[in-house]
Image (cartoon, helix red, strand yellow):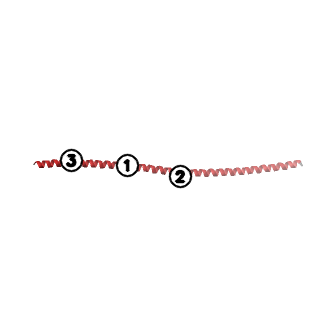
Amino acid sequence: MSIFVDYVVSAIVVCLVVSLISKLAVSLVVSLAVCLVSILVISAVCIVVSLVLNLAVSLLVSLAVSLVVSLAVSLAVCLVSILVVSLVSILVVSLESGLKSRLGLLIGKKSSF
């Protein structure tokens, strides 16, 4: 009878061990699945955030570059226009003074006759 009890106890222990192993295997598979899904979700979120930040940074850099270029071009145009206006006014003043001196000479020659 004690052999029969030993077999029954052994069978119960084997069933418990198999049940425990199967539960551990199922929980391990579920844990791995949850880990993989969380890794995929976190990776997707990181990729999306990275793309959005990359786009925002590139837009800001593009905006800053275009602003600097437009300011530089505007400044260059202003400087060139100031230079042209200054040169034209100097030319007009010198032509005016030259004409006045010639007219003065002409008037002086006519009055001496």
Mark whose residue sits in front, 3 or 2 = 3
Residue type beneath disc 1: Leu
Task: Name which of mark 3 and mark 2 comes first in the sequence.
Answer: 2
Residue type beneath disc 3: Gly
Q: How many marks?
A: 3
Tag 3: Cα neighbours inside 10 Å, few (<14), some, or many (≥20)? few
Residue 38 location, x and y as percent? 63, 51
Provide the secondary structure element on which disc 2 rests.
helix
Which of the labelled discs sits on residue 98, or is there none?
3
The residue labelled by disc 1 is 75
Residue type beneath disc 2: Val
Residue at point 18%, 48% (across, down):
102
Q: Is residue 30 left or right of residue 111?
A: right
Residue 35 location, x and y as percent? 65, 50
Residue at point 69%, 52% (across, down):
30
Residue situated furthest left in the rendering? 113
Task: Name which of mark 1 and mark 3 comes first in the sequence.
Answer: 1
* In front of the other: 67 or 110: 110
**Residue at mark 3 to residue at mark 2: CA–CA distance:** 68 Å
Mark whose residue sits in front, 2 or 1 = 1
Tag 1: Cα neighbours inside 10 Å, few (<14), some, or many (≥20)? few
Pointers 2 and 1 in contact (C-beta within 8 Å)? no
Residue situated furthest right in the rendering? 1
Q: Is residue 70 left or right of residue 35?
A: left
**Residue at mark 2 to residue at mark 1: CA–CA distance:** 34 Å
Residue at point 37%, 49% (across, down):
75
Residue at point 19%, 49% (across, down):
100
Q: Is residue 63 left or right of residue 21?
A: left
* In front of the other: 97 or 14: 97
The residue labelled by disc 2 is 52
Provide the secondary structure element on which disc 1 rests.
helix
